[in-house]
Image (tube, grey):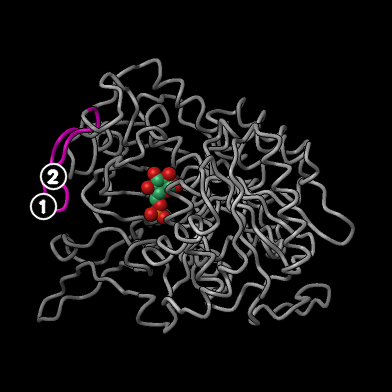
């Protein structure tokens, strides 16, 4: 804890409970709302972290009565909530449900929304405090934001707040991201815009900061003197499922490298922030993103692929081009890999390899910091044949924890050294299960706590990094096929082999 009385204004161990407020959810019928947002709201209520009068207003183009909306939330909670279903919690929460039917360009519907919000202020004591959650395709962002402005919904009255929550994609390149940010900023002042990158809500991702800055053990070796390279992997075994409409034309790099993986890189590479307040934390991440450079030859330092038929979980699966709703001539990549440099004193010369893909061997997200070999090994060459490089692996999911790989003597009468692993497993050290990322992030929105939400500068810098790669790939045309259930295209292996390295097979 800091000795500085200007910091640590509150004891962070106390549960943080949102004050009087409500949330208006646009896109209640979407996958994200059903699978993540609505269950997370219930889980927060169940943990006693929402105010008693909390209200949830659904807005959608459906001819629904209030009971239909309640049923939809009920089903999604039953199916996807993390915590147990408790009737009394549900009843109290459901008393604050309202549904407003309408199109996003329907003035009457937004008038009805304003009246609903006012009514809830009176009967539920929400105090005029509202978050507007845009879980909708980006093509509708401008409509909704302008409607909120025109109908006076974006203006907080004295002593109350209005916030907007935006889901990705934040544009599809730097220019469109700038336009989007500008449009939102014109209506909602910067401190009231919350851009969701759900990876930042994950416990294991926040633990990168704890691991780095709460310990003295790792920081001395966290630099180019000791680190050989860093591999950041987000592998999924699922295919595109029912998300063709969103994914085709977007692809792996825009879908997850632009946001999740570059945020992970920023957390791994950043300097220690002055404190964990939003400005200090985001400033340090921003500095990393500003320092990221692409290699000169994008052909040699990037790879992309598209899955074809193969196996997943013991079952035969079809290829991307045969999935429902995918253009059979699509050149969208389902696998992307890129080598980046971070031009700072700490990291110059250390490659950061990022890769993400669908239909890979298994679902795993991890950050592996791979260390240089010891400068001198006073053993015979055969004694160290099975010793590779030391590594520190942050297992983001699914097997949350950390592994340190180092060499140890094999028991016996000869000196033989082999890699061994030292493991930290969340389940073994903590009794509490980790909250879902969306629980943490929604609570932070309602509390007005922004550190875990990327600032618009970070979003734009990430596009600045990726745009040349995307342009390069667009010029090249078709991505390389890879069989479902494997670890991606051969060009990805070749990309590392050129640097004398190999991808981890987690
Ligand atoms: C989303 C991507 O942001 O993250 C999806 O749009 C991806 O394509 C998902 O499947 C993975 O999230 P998680 O939390 O399961 O790693």
Q: Residue at x 61, y 60 (%)?
A: 56
Q: Determine whether, in the image, residue 239 is placed left or right of residue 191.
A: left
The residue to which callout 2 is attached is 311
Q: Determine whether, in the image, residue 502 is placed left or right of residue 309.
A: right
Looking at the image, is 183 positioned above or below residue 94? above
Figure quadrant of residue 96: bottom right
Figure quadrant of residue 74: bottom left
- Say if the magenta span includes residue 311: yes
Q: Determine whether, in the image, residue 406 is placed left or right of residue 77.
A: left
Q: Residues within 10 Å of mark 1 (few under 14, many from 20)?
A: few
Q: Is mark 2 within 8 Å of ligand 1?
A: no
Q: Residue at x 62, y 43 (%)?
A: 458
Q: Is there a contact, CB below 8 Å, between mark 2 and mark 1?
A: yes
Looking at the image, is 146 positioned above or below residue 125? above
Q: Element type at marker 1? A: loop
Q: Determine whether, in the image, residue 406 is placed left or right of residue 128.
A: left
The residue to which callout 1 is attached is 314
- Say if the magenta span includes residue 475: no
Q: Count how many numbered circles sit on residues in the image.
A: 2
Q: Locate residue 266, reporting x and y percent.
A: 55, 50
Measured in 3D between alpha carbons, the distance from the residue under mark 2 to the one under mark 1, in whole angstroms, is: 6 Å
Identify which residue, 80 or 404, lies in the foreground.
Answer: 80
Quarter containing the N terminus: bottom right
Q: The magenta stretch spans which residues?
A: 308-321
Q: Locate residue 11, reporting x and y percent.
A: 71, 81
């Amino acid at each position: 804890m800091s000795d500085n009385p200007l910091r640590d204004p509150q004891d962070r161990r106390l549960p943080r409970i949102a004050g009087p407020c409500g949330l208006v959810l646009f896109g209640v019928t979407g996958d994200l709302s059903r699978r993540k947002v609505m269950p997370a709201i219930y889980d927060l209520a169940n943990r006693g972290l929402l105010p008693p009068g909390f209200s949830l207003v659904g807005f959608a183009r459906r001819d629904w009565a209030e009971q239909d909306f309640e049923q939809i939330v009920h089903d999604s909670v039953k199916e996807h909530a993390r915590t147990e279903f408790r009737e009394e919690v549900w009843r109290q929460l459901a008393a604050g449900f309202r549904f407003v039917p309408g199109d996003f360009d329907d003035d009457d519907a937004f008038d009805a929304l304003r009246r609903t919000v006012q009514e809830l202020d009176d009967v539920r004591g929400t105090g005029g405090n509202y978050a507007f959650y845009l879980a909708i395709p980006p093509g509708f962002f401008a409509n909704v934001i302008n409607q909120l402005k025109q109908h006076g919904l974006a203006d907080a009255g004295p002593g109350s707040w209005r916030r907007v929550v935006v889901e990705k994609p934040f544009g599809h390149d730097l220019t469109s991201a700038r336009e989007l940010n500008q449009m939102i900023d014109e209506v909602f002042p910067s401190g009231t815009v919350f851009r969701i990158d759900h990876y930042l809500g994950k416990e294991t991702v926040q633990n990168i900061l704890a691991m780095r800055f709460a310990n003295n053990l790792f920081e001395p070796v966290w630099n180019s003197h000791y680190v050989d390279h860093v591999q950041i992997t987000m592998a999924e075994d699922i295919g595109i499922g029912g998300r063709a409409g969103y994914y085709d034309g977007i692809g792996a790099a825009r879908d997850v490298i632009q946001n999740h993986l570059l945020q992970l890189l920023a957390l791994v590479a950043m300097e220690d922030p002055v404190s964990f307040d939003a400005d200090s934390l985001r400033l340090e991440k921003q500095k990393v993103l500003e320092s990221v450079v692409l290699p000169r030859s994008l052909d040699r330092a990037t790879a992309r692929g598209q899955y074809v038929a193969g196996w997943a979980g013991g079952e035969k699966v079809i290829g991307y081009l045969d999935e429902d709703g995918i253009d059979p001539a699509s050149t969208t990549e389902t696998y992307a890999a890129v080598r980046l440099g971070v031009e700072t004193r700490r990291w110059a010369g250390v490659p950061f390899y990022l890769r993400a893909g669908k239909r890979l061997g298994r679902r795993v997200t991890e950050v592996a910091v791979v260390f240089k070999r010891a400068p001198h090994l006073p053993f015979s060459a055969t004694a160290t044949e099975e010793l590779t490089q030391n590594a520190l692996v942050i297992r983001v999911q699914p097997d949350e924890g950390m592994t340190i790989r180092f060499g140890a003597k094999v028991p016996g009468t000869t000196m033989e050294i082999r890699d061994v692993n030292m493991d930290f497993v969340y389940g073994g050290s903590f009794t509490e299960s980790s909250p879902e990322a969306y629980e943490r992030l929604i609570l932070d929105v309602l509390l007005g706590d922004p550190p875990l939400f990327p600032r618009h500068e970070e979003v734009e810098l990430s596009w600045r990094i990726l745009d040349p790669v995307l342009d390069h790939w667009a010029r090249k045309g078709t991505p390389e096929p890879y069989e479902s259930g494997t670890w991606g295209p051969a060009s990805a292996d070749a990309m590392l082999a050129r640097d004398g390295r190999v991808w981890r097979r987690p």
